[in-house]
Image (cartoon, coloured by chain):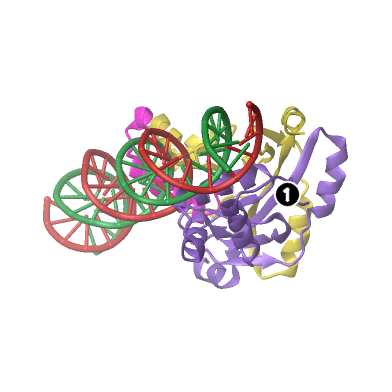
Chain colours: A yellow, B purple, C red, D green
Amino acid sequence: MPLIPVRLTRNQQAVLDGLNQQAHPISAQELYSLLRERQGIGLATVYRALEILRLRGLAQSRVGASGESLYSPVDHDQHYLTCLHCGQSFPLDHCPVQELAAQLQPSMSFKIYYHTLEFFGLCEPCNQLIE
Amino acid sequence: MPLIPVRLTRNQQAVLDGLNQQAHPISAQELYSLLRERQGIGLATVYRALEILRLRGLAQSRVGASGESLYSPVDHDQHYLTCLHCGQSFPLDHCPVQELAAQLQPSMSFKIYYHTLEFFGLCEPCNQLIE
DNA sequence: AGGCGAATGATAATCATTCTCATTATATTC
DNA sequence: GAATATAATGAGAATGATTATCATTCGCCT
C-alpha cells in the first residue's frame, strides 16, 4: 500500500528518501545525523516530517532497545521474533497476516494502511539458560 | 500462555495484581498512581517490577498517544485497529494470529510467549475528512 | 516586487524511563 | 535466634527521546 499522496517540501522529501534507502527500521535521531551532513536539516524538522509522513501511512513501528520509535517505509515492513531475555530480533521471511488483512478489509469501515506483528518469547540459547 | 513461574516480592505481586485488574493495557505511570495510594510503592519499583514481569512473558505492547509503553497481562492480550489521524483505537474481537502462532511454533527453535498485532489506517470519519 | 502562511532551525521544556546510592527487607548460615 | 549476605526498595538525580517556542526564512500567489 503506497503512502497517501501529498506535496512534500524538500526536507520532507529528503526524510522520505532517507528512509527508503534503509533496509531496516531506523530511529529519528539516526535519520537526523544521516541527513544533517547530507543537507543541513534540523532535528525538529526531522521529527515534524516523520509525523507528517506517519499520518500518510508511514510505519512507526518497533521500539528500539533504548525505547525510541523506529520508522520504516511501508513496503519494507517486516515482522520479527524478539527474545525477551537477550533482546535479539529475528526477522520472519513471510508475513502470515497479509492475506488476513486483505480479507478483513472489505467487511469493515476502516481503511487499513499497514500492520505490525511481533512475536515475543525466548530464543534457543536463552531458553536453555532460563530452565 | 501463563507467565513463567517465579517467586515474586509483595510489590512485584502488587504490580501483577494491578495489571490483572485492568481491562486494557496501562502505562507504568498510571499503574504507579494506582498502587501508590493503595500501598505506597515507589515509581522506580514499579518500573523494575514491570521489567521482571516482562522477562517472564508479560506483554509490553502498545505505545500510547504520548509515546509511553503500555503493559498488559498476557491472557488479556488484545489487538487493535488504530486510526493514524485521530489516534482512536478499536479493539478486534478475534485474534487472527492465534492459530498461525501455534502452527509456527513447532517448526522453529524459538519459544513464543505472546505476540502483538496492530493495524493502522483511517477510521471512517477521518477517511472522509482526508479525501 | 510585495505579502502571507507554512516551514525551518536553534534551543528550551517536557516527560517517560533509568541510574545512583543509602536504607530496608528477605533469605541463609551458624 | 543472631549474624551475615543478598536482593529489593524509595527518593531523587540523570538521561535521552520527543515536543513546544519563537524568531527567521522560504515558497507561492497576485
Does dot 1 land on a helix, a strand or a loop?
A: loop
Report which quarter residue A65 is drawn in.
top right
Using residue A130 as the reference point, say whether residue B109 is left or right of it.
Answer: right
Q: Amino acid at mark 1?
A: Leu
Residue A110: in magenta span:
no
| Residue drawn at x 35%, y 40% as measured from the top left | A43
The answer, for residue A60, to whether it is visible in the render is: no
Q: Chain of mark 1?
A: B
Tell me where residue A74 appears, x and y as whole percent.
Answer: 60, 45
Q: From the viewer's perspective, is residue A88 above or below residue A116?
A: above
| Residue drawn at x 49%, y 58% as measured from the top left | B32
B109 or D11: which is nearer to us? D11
Quadrant of the rendering where the C terminus of chain A is positioned = top right
- The tally of labels here is 1
D18 or A115: which is nearer to us? D18
Tell me where residue A24 appears, x and y as whole percent.
Answer: 59, 34
A76 or B101: which is nearer to us? B101
| Residue drawn at x 59%, y 53% as measured from the top left | B10
Q: Which residue is mark 1?
A: B3
B15 or B119: which is nearer to us? B15
Report which quarter residue A82 is drawn in.
top right
Using residue A37 as the reference point, say whether residue D21 is left or right of it.
Answer: left
Tell me where residue A32 appears, x and y as whole percent.
Answer: 40, 35
Magenta residues, as a range? A36-64
The answer, for residue A48, to whether it is visible in the render is: yes
